[in-house]
C-alpha cells in the first residue's frame, strides 16, 4: 500500500505561533531578561503592557509600557480589550492589550508576555495553550538584595513588594518551566530556547 503524500500548505500564510508567558516575583529581573531579548533576539515580539503607574526614570511610553490614566484603563476594560488585567501590589492597574498579541501570533511570530502572577493565572484560563515560564532568583536573600539595591521604592513599598514576592514564590509549581536568573545572558538564552523549541 502506497504511503500517503505529505500534506503541503497551499499558501504563504504562516502557522500561528505559541504565546510564552514569563512571570516571577518582584525584582527577580523579568524586565532585565526581557530587555536582553529585545536587544539580542528581535524576531521575538515582546508584548507591551498597559499600566496606570507613573513611568520610572528611563522608561519610554509605548516601549516599556503603555502609560494610561485610570480613566483610559477603565475604558479599555469596559470594551474587553485586555487579555488579562489586575491590580498589582494593591495600587496600580496593569493589563495586556489583546489585539496586538493575537495579531503577532496569527502572523507566526513568537510572542513573549512578561507579567505578574495574577495575570499569568488569567492567561492560563483565556489561552491555556500558552507556555508558562517562572523566573526564579538563585536564593531568597538575593531577591531581597536586588529589591533593596534597585532603590526605586520607599521602605513601605519595599515591604509590600516583599510580602507579595513570598506569595509569588510559592506559585512556582503552577508553571511549565522554571528558569533561575543567576546570570541574565544565560537565563535569556534558556528562555529563548524554550520559546523557539518544540517542547510541548
Image (cartoon, rainbow, N blue to C red):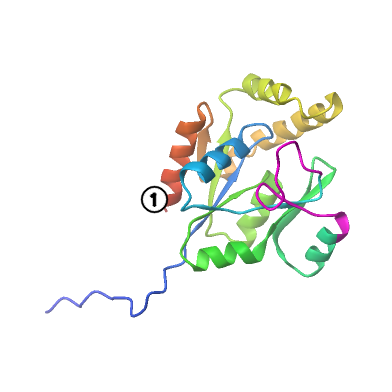
Q: Is residue 178 left or right of residue 124?
A: left
Q: Considering only vertical position in the picture, is 32 above or below 38?
A: above
Question: What percent of the width, then of the height, locates residue 160?
Answer: 81, 31
Q: Residue at (49%, 34%) from the top-left corner?
A: 187
Asked where in the image residue 138 lies, by quadrant, the reply is top right
Say if the magenta span includes residue 56.
yes
Decide if residue 40 is on the left or right side of residue 96.
left
Q: Is the residue 139 above or below the residue 195 in the image?
A: above
Q: Nearer the viewer, residue 27 or 170?
A: 27
Residue located 70% across and 38% down the image: 58
Q: Kindly identify the residue that appears in the image at 85 percent across and 54 percent down.
A: 69
User: Chief secondary structure of the magenta span?
Assistant: loop
Question: What segment carries the magenta color?
Answer: 54-71
Return the residue nearer the eye: 91 or 149.
Answer: 149
Query: In the rendered image, which residue does mark 1 sit on?
Result: 197
- Identify which residue is drawn at 63% across, 62% down: 126
Amino acid at each position: 500500500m502506497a504511503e500517503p503524500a505529505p500534506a503541503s500548505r497551499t499558501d504563504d500564510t504562516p502557522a500561528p505561533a505559541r504565546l510564552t508567558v514569563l512571570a516571577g516575583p518582584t525584582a527577580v529581573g523579568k524586565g532585565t531578561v526581557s530587555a536582553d531579548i529585545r536587544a539580542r533576539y528581535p524576531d521575538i515580539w515582546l508584548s507591551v503592557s498597559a499600566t496606570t503607574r507613573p513611568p520610572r526614570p528611563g522608561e519610554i511610553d509605548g516601549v516599556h509600557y503603555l502609560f494610561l490614566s485610570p480613566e483610559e484603563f477603565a475604558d479599555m476594560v469596559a470594551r474587553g480589550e485586555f487579555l488579562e488585567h489586575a491590580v498589582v501590589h494593591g495600587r496600580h492597574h496593569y493589563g495586556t492589550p489583546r489585539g496586538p498579541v493575537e495579531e503577532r501570533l496569527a502572523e507566526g511570530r513568537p510572542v513573549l508576555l512578561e507579567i505578574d502572577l495574577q495575570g499569568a493565572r488569567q492567561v492560563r484560563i483565556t489561552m491555556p495553550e500558552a507556555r508558562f515560564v517562572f523566573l526564579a532568583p538563585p536564593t531568597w536573600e538575593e531577591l531581597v538584595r536586588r529589591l533593596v539595591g534597585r532603590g526605586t521604592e520607599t521602605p513601605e513599598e519595599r515591604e509590600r513588594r516583599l510580602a507579595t514576592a513570598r506569595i509569588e514564590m510559592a506559585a512556582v509549581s503552577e508553571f511549565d518551566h522554571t528558569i533561575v536568573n543567576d546570570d541574565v545572558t544565560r537565563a535569556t538564552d534558556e528562555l529563548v530556547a524554550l520559546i523557539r523549541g518544540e517542547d510541548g
